[in-house]
Amino acid sequence: MAEETTKENKAVEKLVEEIAKLSVLDLSELVSALQEKLGVSAMPVAAAAAPVASGEAAPAADEGGLKTVVMTNAGGNKIGVIKALREINQNLTLMDAKGMTEAVPAEILKDAKAEDAKSAEEKLKAAGATVELK
């Protein structure tokens, strides 16, 4: 049984070495192909909220309420906007972020806390995009 584990580890190590040689675009395509082939998503599962003890009121999501961030124009610095989009949502692939800059208006964040929405708005505006908070 120890031999099987060693063989599996070497196979995994070899795969990791080969994957590490790929470009970012190739990695993006690999992830998409694996998701499609295996029927899974790389999106993280949101953690369940802690139960509220009886008698306590659930706290409001945020005093400002939930906001939606919509990019209405990517502007002239699309590379900067793509970087900002990927900073806001680390789960976006390079191709997804590029697609969002080309298909405006694009919903960047939905039902986000007011402070998160404001932060995203500032990052996108600093990169040259036109953004609306709804």
Image: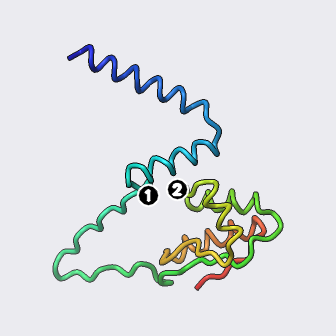
Vertical relation: 59 (above or below) 116? below
Vertical relation: 109 (above or below) 55? above
Q: Are circles 2 and 1 on residues that touch, CB within 8 Å? A: yes
The numbered disc on residue 60 is: none
Residue type, mark 2 in image = Asn
Alpha-carbon neighbours of circle 2 within 10 Å: few (<14), some, or many (≥20)?
some
Residue in the picture at 62% in, 57% down: 86
- Residue at far top of view: 3
Circle 1 sits on which residue? 43
Q: Is residue 28 left or right of residue 5?
A: right
Vertical relation: 105 (above or below) 20? below
Residue in the picture at 58% in, 54% down: 93
User: Can you tell which quarter of the image residue 129 is in?
Assistant: bottom right
Alpha-carbon neighbours of circle 1 within 10 Å: few (<14), some, or many (≥20)?
few
- Residue at far front of view: 37
Quarter of the image that includes the N terminus: top left
Circle 2 sits on which residue? 91
Q: Is residue 69 left or right of residue 72?
A: left
Quarter of the image that includes the C terminus: bottom right
Residue type, mark 1 in image = Met
Indicate the position of residue 89 as horizontal and vertical percent values: 56, 60
The answer for how far apart the CA atoms under marks 2 and 1 are is: 7 Å
Indicate the position of residue 122 as horizontal and vertical percent values: 68, 70
Indicate the position of residue 35 as horizontal and vertical percent values: 44, 51
73 vs 27, nearest the viewer:
27
Residue in the picture at 75% in, 66% down: 126
Q: Is residue 113 left or right of residue 134?
A: left
Q: Earlier in the sequence, mark 2 or mark 1?
A: 1
Please name the colour scheme applied to the rendered image.
rainbow
8 vs 62, nearest the viewer:
8
Under circle 2, the secondary element is: loop
108 vs 49, nearest the viewer:
108
